[in-house]
Amino acid sequence: MSTSSFSKKFGDAVLFIVSIFVLFGAFAFYQWSSAPKATKSKKGKGFRFAVRTQTAQRGKIDESLELSGDLMARRNTTIASETTGAVTRILAREGTKLRKGQTILYLNRTDQTLNVQKQQALLQQAKAGLLRARAILARDRDQYKRTQRLRRSKTVAENELIQARYQFEASQAAVTESEALIALRKAELSISQRDLSRTVIRAPFDGEISRLYVEAGKWVKNGDPIVDFVDAKGIEIRMYVPPRYIGKIAVSQTVDIFRARSPQDKVQTRIARLLPIADASSRNREIIAYLKAPPPSFLPGLPIKARVTLSQREGALLVKKDALIRQGNGWLLFKVQQNKARRVEVQILNESNGVVEVSGDVKAGDQVVTVGNEALFHNAPVASQDPFAKPKATSSR
């Protein structure tokens, strides 16, 4: 082997080893730079994770139930056409507020108007026929009475009396027939007026148009939807109670309502009704509450969250919710003992306003990590700081 070949291989080997060290150094630097912030101990040996803690303590907590639900209009209806015709005029659009009975739109009403006029004329004709029949009846009644007197005096024959009686009875029947005809004409006029009224779409109650299905010139048939109309003044809240909590809910219980993505929008009301059956698919039971004057942000169709206060517990072991870390189907937290983080598995018993009641190897007075707990491991060295601790006084020179 020549000297130059040996030198080349040696140089390559050295370059390879140096490259390995550079890669390991870069990896170590990356791990060090991305590791949680640590703080040196007073003696300058090792490091500690900087965390914040709060003291677990016993106190009072509301036992509450978190529910989901929906906002719905108390009255919501779709107005459909009750006749056939073309839309001729629209007086209100989506979002228009209307009083009960105000007109929304008109359908073509030419045929219905003509039919009303026809029935009015027929009714007048029937009334005139009744007047004529009553006049004939009065004449035949007088003739019958005169014939009766003449027959008693034997001035006329028996057959003339019989003829006068038949004529009188026929006149009575004619009057009855005319009265029946008037009743028929009145019914037909009412039907035609009803058909005419169906060409005008009116607000069924005080509310707003949420959707308009037609435009001017559109042909609609009997049963076609015209508008969706809602009463936005009153809001109905439907909430869904899981089966295991059904027995704990009752009418008149106070319930706090939050918008699903805006918890700052909060209102309070009471449970008004409990539906008597559970949903066949989810097994949940629906409960209903009302808001007579909802905030502007509480619109029908939006989801909500609700909290029902069931009772109050005294002497509960309380920690901040920030102290809890999810682990599979359970929860854990870290408590500080002798400057080390001890990993403790706990169970959540109740939760209210960011405070959680827990059970496990935690007691009142323990320092529980609330900030920086995500990077910890069991027996990790920590430098804890209680945010409620009084700062040490500093002397000025």
Image (tube, rainbow, N blue to C red):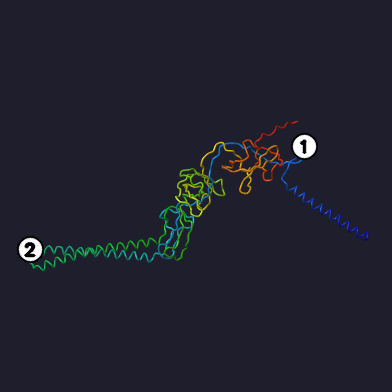
The amino acid beneath tag 1 is Lys
Name the element at disc 2.
Answer: helix
Looking at the image, is 357 positioned above or below residue 17?
above
- Identify the residue at horizontal 62%, vertical 45% (top origin): 331
**Label 2, label 1: how far apart the Cα atoms are:** 150 Å
Q: Which residue is mark 2?
A: 152
Label 1 environment density (alpha carbons within 10 Å; few <14, some 14–19, many ≥20):
few
- Identify the residue at horizontal 46%, vertical 63% (top origin): 216
Front residue of 259/66: it is 66
- Identify the residue at horizontal 54%, vertical 38% (top origin): 313
Mark toward the start of the polypeptide (2 vs 1): 1
Could you tell me residue 96's position as x and y percent? 47, 55
Name the element at disc 1.
Answer: loop
Could you tell me residue 137's position as x and y percent? 18, 63
Q: What mark, if any, has residue 43 been given in the picture?
A: 1
Location of the C terminus by quadrant is: top right
- Which quadrant of the figure has residue 14? bottom right
Side of 223 relative to 157 (left or right): right
